[in-house]
Amino acid sequence: MDNRQMVPYYHLAKGNLWAGINEYDSASTYYRIASMSLNRWVAAEASRRLKLLYSSLGKDSCSFYSALAANEHLVNELRREEGVESRTKYEKAKLENELNRLKIDKQRREIWLLSLGLCFVVAFAASYIVWQRRKRQMYKQLWREQSLRLSQTEQLLQQSEELSILREKESLLRESLFRRMKSFHKIPSLEKEEESTEEENDNQNRRIALSNEEWEDIRQTVDGSYDNFSARLLEAFPGLSMKDVYFCCLVKINVSIKDLSDIYCISRTSISRKKQRMKRDKLGLTENNETLDDFLRRF
């Protein structure tokens, strides 16, 4: 404790000492000094001792004033203590309120963070559900597309098989029609012979004579086999003569150059030139990559 704070207690103790040896004048002096101290408890105690001293000396008026001073010091000290206590209670209540406010703020932050986390979880769950749904829809769409492709592939295969069957039947029908031609056996390339026989025929030179009736029979057979071939050809190329149509019919049914050479009694080179002139002059075809045979086969 500071020495200045010890001075009032020192004066009070000196007063008690002088009162104990019956030195009342010195005791009253130190009591009065102590009663004027800023320490209210010391001042109140000194006033009370001074009252008792004056009362024992028969100084009632001085004892009365000393009692009033002691009472005033006690009241002021009590008020101060009450003020300190009230202030302490206020500060404590303020501190508790501040702690409660901090707790509430903390709870609010926790609630906000929980709400934010919950919103994030809900958003993530919703996004995941939507993604899964879209994924399932995509898989369903892919499955439907694959099923459709498989179905289309099966249909195409079926149609291809049917087309192959139809082509085989068409080929058989054409072959049957060709066999009914009067000139069928006159033209070796129309018959199915072994390669050795064809090679032997290639080395032989003979003339194939066709009558007007046989030429017309060839044209009608080709028309029956290839959707009115000669009529469509004349419609597309009106400048063709009937001899040109007969030649195109022979090319259409794949009559070989050797047989054409034997039919027209010209060399094979001349047959090739005849095809070139037919393509260029009569049909007006300028494509170099496409031969007359290719054009007539797909016509």
Image (spheres, rainbow, N blue to C red):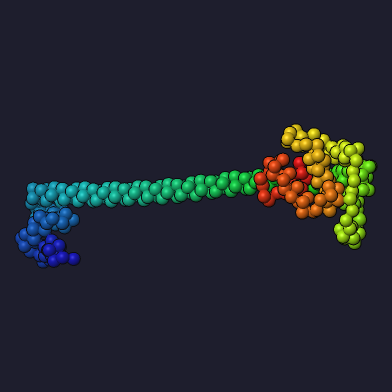
Q: Is residue 234 above or below residue 131?
A: above
Residue 48 in view (yes/no):
no
Q: Residue at x 90, y 46 (%)?
A: 209
Query: What percent of the width, then of the height, locates residue 75?
Result: 19, 48
Query: What percent of the width, then of the height, locates residue 298?
Result: 76, 44
Query: What percent of the width, then of the height, locates residue 198?
Result: 88, 58
- From the viewer's perspective, is 5 left or right of 208? left
Q: Is residue 144 above or below residue 269?
A: above
Give the position of the C terminus as an image quadrant: top right
Q: Residue at x 10, y 55 (%)?
A: 36
Q: Residue at x 91, y 59 (%)?
A: 197
Residue 72 in view (yes/no):
yes
Count all numbered tags in the image, as a single digit. Answer: 0
Q: Residue at x 11, y 51 (%)?
A: 66
- From the viewer's perspective, is 26 left or right of 261? left
Query: What percent of the width, then of the height, locates residue 42?
Result: 16, 57
Give the position of the N terminus as an image quadrant: bottom left
